[in-house]
């Protein structure tokens, strides 16, 4: 049963022949396609990673842009509020100034009227007092000196 | 013929020894089965490698499974460079032994199926090819410095290394031969003892043993070749 003979040599040749034939006709395409697939998977994974990184970058960029836009909007609103406040303040100040002016003008005019009325009253009183005094003393008092004296009297009364 | 007489004198495995030329006796049964095995291995790989697709299917998928399995083993022991160099040899070695081991388990209908590996000549042929191949590849890869490992870690280990050179091919071939021959003998014995059901369990187990022995032989061959690609 254990009988070593020329079969040994024949089997070595058979095996080497099989290795040679398979290496020549069969392995190359198979090993190549397996290598190619391996490389393709690796490159696809790499591409997927790159795409993911890119997506992340775009997302971050959008987030940054959104934040910027929000900030800008806030700034615009703030600005508008300030402008409105300024306009409001200005209008208020103008109105107040105008109002003050009107009040001042009115006061002035009242004072003027008052003065004028007082002057009228004074003249009337002078005349009345002259008439009354002339009646009282039954004497014609027509000189300038009399009028002046009567005026001083009237003034002293009015200013009491 | 004297061999013929020996075969009919109670042996249950027949090798059909024939003197093809004066002094050259060849086991024809082993040769026929080897050629069938070679044809099967070749057809499998040839079919798989015609028009290979990036997305594999059918026979390509099956053969790629084996290649991928062996590529993993080779990368572990030989490294990437060693794998590219040794892939045709190792893949053929594994598939040849694997198909050899399984072919003897086919039902004996019409044809007397035996494993080429039930012949000690086949097993020695393979283990000697591996041993000599390891020397040749080692010389090609590293030159004479390949033999430095004989005196490592110290020159005192030289006898052990030399012993290893003899023992390794011997054990590799005898392990394979013993397992497969024993499997076939036991199968024949079982058919005679309990012709129904029982042999089928043994066939299943033998199919598994066939894969296991092919794997073990390939692994040991890889350790032989590993020295040629080892970095120091």
Image (cartoon, coloured by chain):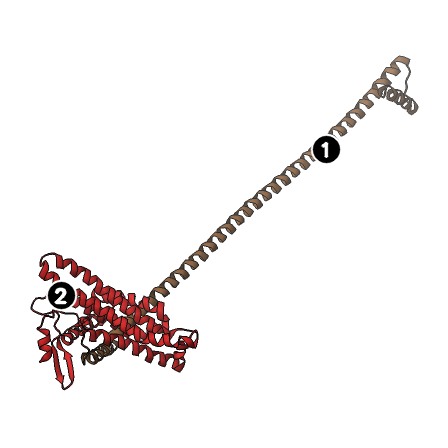
Chain colours: A brown, B red
Residue B20 screen position, x and y as percent:
13, 83
For marks 2 and 1, give the one nearer the viewer.
2
Tell me how far mark 2 sits from mark 1, CA to CA.
129 Å
Quadrant of the drawing holding the N terminus of chain B:
bottom left
Residue A20 screen position, x and y as percent:
24, 79
Residue A104 - label? 1
Q: Residue at x 35, y 71 (%)?
A: B78
Furthest toward the left, the residue is B110
**In-image side of A137 versus B176 (left or right):** right
Q: Is residue B98 above or below residue B162?
A: above
**In-image side of A86 versus A47 (left or right):** right
Q: Chain of mark 1?
A: A
Q: Quadrant of residue A133?
A: top right
Quadrant of the drawing holding the C terminus of chain B:
bottom left
Local packing at callout 1 (Cα closer than 10 Å; few below 14, some 14-19, many 20+) is: few
> Which sits in the foreground, A51 or B87?
B87
Residue B6 screen position, x and y as percent:
10, 75
Say which element carries label 1. helix
Q: Say which residue label 2 marks.
A: B106
Q: Are marks 2 and 1 on the same chain?
A: no
Q: Quadrant of residue B85?
A: bottom left
Q: Is residue A117 above or below residue B232?
A: above
Q: Chain of mark 2?
A: B
Say which element carries label 2. loop
> Which sits in the foreground, B128 or A145?
B128
Q: Residue at x 40, y 76 (%)?
A: B149
């Amino acid at each position: 049963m254990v009988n070593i003979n020329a079969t040994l040599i024949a089997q070595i040749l058979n095996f080497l022949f099989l290795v040679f034939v398979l290496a020549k006709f069969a392995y190359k395409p198979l090993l190549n396609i397996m290598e190619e697939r391996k490389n393709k998977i690796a490159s696809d994974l790499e591409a997927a990673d790159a795409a993911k990184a890119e997506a992340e970058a775009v997302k971050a960029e959008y987030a940054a842009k959104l934040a910027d836009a929000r900030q800008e909007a806030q700034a615009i609103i703030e600005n508008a509020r300030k402008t409105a406040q300024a306009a409001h303040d200005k209008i208020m100040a103008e109105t107040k100034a105008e109002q003050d002016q009107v009040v001042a003008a009115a006061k002035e005019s009242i004072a003027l009227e008052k003065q004028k009325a007082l002057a009228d009253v004074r003249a009337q009183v002078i005349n009345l007092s002259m008439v009354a005094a002339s009646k009282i003393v039954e004497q014609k008092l027509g000189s300038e000196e009399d009028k002046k004296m009567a005026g001083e009297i009237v003034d002293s009364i009015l200013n009491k | 013929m004297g061999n013929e007489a020996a075969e009919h004198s109670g042996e249950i495995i027949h090798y059909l020894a024939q003197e093809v030329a004066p002094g050259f006796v060849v086991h024809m049964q082993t040769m026929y089965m080897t050629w069938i095995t070679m044809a099967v291995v070749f057809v499998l790989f040839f079919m798989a490698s015609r028009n290979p697709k990036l997305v594999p299917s059918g026979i390509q998928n099956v053969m790629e499974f084996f290649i991928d399995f062996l590529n993993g083993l080779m990368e572990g022991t030989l490294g990437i460079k060693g794998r590219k160099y040794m892939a045709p040899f190792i893949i053929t070695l594994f598939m040849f032994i694997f198909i050899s081991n399984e072919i003897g388990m086919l039902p004996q209908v019409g044809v007397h199926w035996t494993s080429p590996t039930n012949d000690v000549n086949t097993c020695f042929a393979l283990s000697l090819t591996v041993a000599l191949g390891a020397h040749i590849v080692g010389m090609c890869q590293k030159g004479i410095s390949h033999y430095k490992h004989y005196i490592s870690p110290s020159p005192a280990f030289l006898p052990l290394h030399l012993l290893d050179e003899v023992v390794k091919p011997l054990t590799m071939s005898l392990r394979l031969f013993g397992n497969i021959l024993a499997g076939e003998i036991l199968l024949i014995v079982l058919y005679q003892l309990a012709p129904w059901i029982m042999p089928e369990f043994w066939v299943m187990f033998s199919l598994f043993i066939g894969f296991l022995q092919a794997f073990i032989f390939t692994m040991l061959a890889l350790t032989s070749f590993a020295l040629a690609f080892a970095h120091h």
